Amino acid sequence: MSRAVRLILSIAAVILIALLAHRQAEASDGLLASGAAIGTLLLGAWFTGRLVALITLPKITGYLIFGLFAGPYGLQAITHEQLDYLRLINDFAISLIALTAGGEIHLALLRKSARTISAILVMQIVAVMTGVVAVAYLTLPHLVTGVDFGSNAQLLIIALLVASVCCLSSPAAVIAVLTETRAEGPVAGMTLAVTVCKDLVLIVIFAVVVSVATGVIDPESTRSLVSASTLKTIAVHLLGSLAMGAGVGFVLAVWLRRVRVQIPLLVVFTCFGIAVVSESLHLEPLLVALTAGMLVLNAREHDAEALFDTVEELSVPVYCIFFALAGAKINPEALALTWPMALVLVGTRTATIWGGTTAGARLTGLRSAWLPLGYLPQAGVSIALAYAVKETLSGLPDISDKVFTLLLAAITCNEIAGPALLKLALVRSGETQKDA
Amino acid sequence: MQAFLVILTLAALALVAASPRRFRPTRSRSAVNTFIAVWGSVVVGILLGPTVTALIPAQPITYAKPLAVLGLGWIGVMVGAQARTSLLRLVSRRIWTIVALDTLITAMVIAPLAYLALSRWLAPGRPPSAVVALIAAAALGWAMETRSARVASTAEAHRLAIVIRASGGLLAIAAIIAVGVASIISTTVTPLATAVSGATVLVVAATAALLLKFAISITSGKRGDQLCVFLGAVGLAAGTAAEIHLSPLFAALLTGVAIANMPGKGLRSFEAFILRGEHVVAALFGLTAGILIDIRIGLGGLVLVFLLTAMRLLLKPVTLSLAIRFSDDAPGQRLPASSPLYLAPIRVSPVAIALGVSLVLLDPSATNNRVLAVLLISGLLAEVVSITLTAMGARRVGATKAVAA
């Protein structure tokens, strides 16, 4: 029996066991059943990752596909109730992925490439914001039917919200593909650095756009379009995350230098700690863990090896569960309902990312035809921003639902196709390692 | 800020409590080291939990429950993996005698005692049979750690240590099977339903083991992949059992037994890989157990604690001595007539913690929480008593070196 057939049978067995358990459980207890959900997602996603790897797709595409098929919108081997109780696991995964990302960023290299990173970052944001705003402004009223988008100002602000979500790439997906392919080189380095920096810049941009949108949508609002309190909140959010990240990084560095034992337990506790504390202090776990990872790598590079070796060991189960969970949240109905506008949006985003990246790279003399493909993946943070857009537009229920569905559809396309395109870029640039 | 302090305290205490040196005590002050091991994590959990400082908020505890199911699965597989038939064939008649005698005495003495105590104090009326079975099962066997008992390092003492460890391992398997069978019987009303539930657990465990075997054959020895498929198989077996309100430990144990007895390259090294994580899992699990319990067990609970501890103190050394006396020494397998090691079985098997946690996870009722508290407190007490008595005995005979078993 070929390996592919055995993998397919294994995936079927995992799904069958989960369905059998749901059938036999008299009253579904989401909390108790969530242990089974972890097993189903880990094992099923791992097998699917191996299966898609046979056709040279990245494994995370397999993890996403498994989540989609087994999730509540697919075969319902994983239910909504089970997903609700996996939030802590998801936050843990985000922290570990960000810690990995931080461990890849050498400050010396960052300083050396600062000009190129800034140029690509600025050109990409300008190109995507301009392009997507223009296209959304012109096409939304025609392609999303049955909704009145109101005044031109309102339509423009909706277009701005859509554009700021489209701008975002997925640091998690980038890290996962780089880890899997063990890619090293200018495309890998630049993709990671720009994606991470863009994530930080977009947190600010998105908060400003939401503030403006609230003012435009709710004319009775007394506050100015960009209030001082909004800016203060953003500053506290970012600086607090950086400060906590520095604190965590300092503790990790001291531990690695003085204690040096129990590294796996240290990593597990650190990531859970970041997940729990960030939520209660309203900080950005991604930024906290990223800062901690960067600090450890750059302050104690020699000692950090043990830490990042452990992080790498934990990365496979973490990627499996994180991306399978992301896949389970994909609603294919959204794509079916809004596919014409979603395709326009995905096409515009791809074209503007391509244009902006190429322009930024050329300005600083970097020549790489494949680099733009690295910025296409989207995942969890983009979905979170889509929810934030829905909430911002909650005063306009019809529009809010349609825009949210449209964003989910576009993110679904980028989520599934993005990692494969990134892997293609790395392979074509010759930056992947043969044994990966 | 409270959450930040929680994590810092938790991390620092757990890391200290769980260091390998404390789990594998080989140097001085062995009594302190042993006591700290897994029970140290339990104490830290109790200190951070709702009844002492309430530093851990309720929500993270709730969301940590899926992880506790994984922990139970890990423990179940580790225990089950010991039941390799090729090894079981080597087990001497003497060890089987000890296992049989301890099981008999526990069933005849501890189980009725647990029933009486439960019906009188903790769950007035007719106590659930699964809970009675669980208390009795938790009393089965003893800790398998003997290095900390600092007795003379003679060949005889070494053999006795091996007997204690081997019988402790087999009794841990028996305890999990007893609770698993009791959970199946207590959750079903007709013989057909009992058979279906039993068959479901078997099918799930066998499938998880087969999937794991296939997965391991294609991991190329990569640790990240091994960890992923292991956690996946454990989660699938233990989680599915928990979802249908059966013992997650039992399903995981069966998976472990199946894995241990399957032919296949890479499975042996994989077992070593699983064992590498034992102290991490034990520390996390001890913490979870400590956090989950409510130590306000009342007078009835306290009486049960003292009864369970007293019974261990009286019965366990006698059981071991009797079984050894009534089974003949094979040539060259003579055991010491007296040794402080005979007091080592007073210590409670760490599997008792896992059994208690599984009870609370499946049904977090007030009674079950009190039962968990009783098990943990009596375990702690037995630990202190055993360590003190063994140390006193060792001093009296003037022993200075640890038994390397």
Image: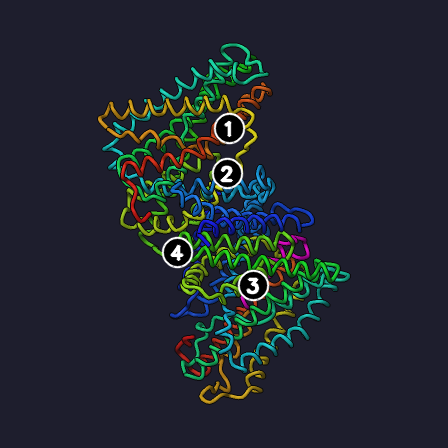
Q: Which of the two labelled residues, at mark 1 and mark 2, occupies the earlier sequence position?
A: 2
Letter of the chain that mark 4 sits on in the rendering:
A
Residue appearing at x 42%, y 19% in the figure = A132
Foreground: disc 3 or disc 4: 3
Letter of the chain that mark 2 sits on in the rendering:
A
Q: Nearer the viewer, residue B342 or A349?
A: A349
Query: Mark 3 near mark 4, Cβ–Cβ under 8 Å?
Result: no
Q: Nearer the viewer, residue B166 or A356?
A: A356
Q: Residues within 10 Å of mark 2 (few under 14, many from 20)?
A: many
The amino acid type found where label 2 is placed reads: Gly
The residue tagged 3 is: B254
The residue tagged 1 is: A409
What range of the chain is rendered magenta?
A: B349-369
Relative to A66, is B264 above or below? below
Element under label 2?
helix
Element under label 4?
loop
Label placed on residue A262: 4
Q: Residues within 10 Å of mark 3 (few under 14, many from 20)?
A: many
The amino acid type found where label 3 is placed reads: Leu
Same chain under badges 3 and 1? The reply is: no
Q: Which of the two labelled residues, at mark 4 and mark 1, occupies the earlier sequence position?
A: 4
Picture coordinates of residue A95, whole percent (x, y): 43, 41
Q: Distance from label 1 to label 2 (Cα)?
A: 12 Å
The residue tagged 2 is: A327
The amino acid type found where label 1 is placed reads: Ala
